[in-house]
Amino acid sequence: MKKTRTIPAAVNSVRYRTVDSHLHALDFLQQTEGFAALADVMDEAGVEQAVVFGMPMAKQWDSTMPKAPSYYLSNDSRCYYYSGTDYILAELLKKQPAKIRKRFYPFCCGINGNDRMAATQLRRLLEMYPDFWCGIGELMSRHDDLTALTYGEAPHVNHPAFLEIFDLAAEYDLPVLVHHNITAQGNEEVLYLDELKEALAHNRDCRIIWAHAGISRRVEIQNLTKIVRDMLKKNKNLWVDISWVVYDYYVLDNFPNHYADNDTPEDWVRLIEDYPDRFMLGTDVVGCWDKYVQEVRKYDVLLEKLTPDTAGKLCRDNILAVMKKNGGTK
Ligand SMILES: [Zn+2]
């Protein structure tokens, strides 16, 4: 007998139609709980559609570790660039029934940003799966411990390999989502913003989404709203994703024991209302869906402070606009 699904409480209180702009279908071991289960939790959370990508890094299971890691921070083992992620994602998604498949906008991400062959590899992927990819990302530029755990030069978004990817994205009219920290951990001075400015200026036809507004764990700076405001004012090809820790640490400003930055939640509300077409939100879950509903609902606190029009743009319209999708089926 078919099991009757009880409607979770969350469904009744869903207030915002959402398109998740930042979702990793695969984790750091390139594993997933799968699209069917993902579609169920999206239903619970009121999320109609999602931008989905794999994970461009894999975490190595060292011989000295008694059990497999589950996250890049699980232990001291290294991470490495893993291009297979895009092929795993594409094959998994293509196998889904149409009613699930049409809810996802896949992005490709499996490149090493220090490798001048990166754009060529992405071009091949775009050609191998024509009309499939809706964007490029989440590309990993400077990323706290993940950078430190990965062999080789620290990736940086103004590297020629990245710039060639931005040209490719402009050619294919695809947005690029990039994780690029604003500074190093524990350094209050802004170190890496000029790299992003250079990347944005390189090709104004390339639409760049800045993941987490440049914030990661233990990245603690002052005046973030002022910096983001200035970046949006000067760069018409920039969008900002407030997923993950930037929302908890900076926007909500109520993280336990958090470093006291000098912005208030009201500063964020003002900034988003001043640039209502430039922000988007996402869950940034990685391959596992147990916290999915909570990661969507955490934004209600902010959304309730915005005008309904701006809230709708943040939840849905902006990510669809940056992908040039109308919200219908692909
Ligand atoms: Zn992410």
Image: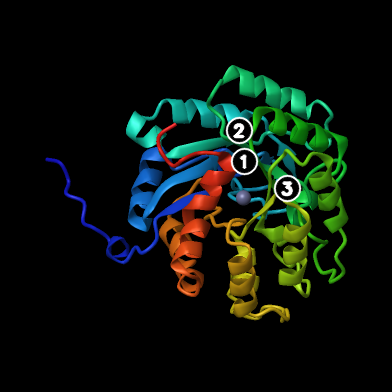
Q: CA distance from mark 1 to mark 3?
A: 17 Å
Please give left or right for residue 170 compared with residue 98 in the image. right
Q: CA distance from mark 3 to mark 2?
A: 19 Å
Residue 20 makes an appearance in the image = yes
Residue 253 makes an appearance in the image = no
Is residue 198 or residue 213 the one in the foreground? 198
Tag 2 near tag 1, CB within 8 Å: yes
Circle 1: is it few (<14), some (14-19), or many (20+) Cα within 10 Å? many
Please give left or right for residue 322 compared with residue 151 in the image. left
Amino acid carrying mark 3 in the image: Ser
- Dot 1 falls on a residue whose secondary structure is loop
Amino acid carrying mark 1 in the image: Met
Amino acid carrying mark 2 in the image: Thr
- Dot 2 falls on a residue whose secondary structure is helix
The residue that mark 1 highlights is 55
Is residue 107 or residue 233 the one in the foreground? 233
Q: Residue at x 72, y 78 (%)?
A: 259
Q: Is mark 2 within 8 Å of ligand 1?
A: no
Q: In terms of sequence position, does the residue under pointer 1 or pointer 3 come before the other? A: 1
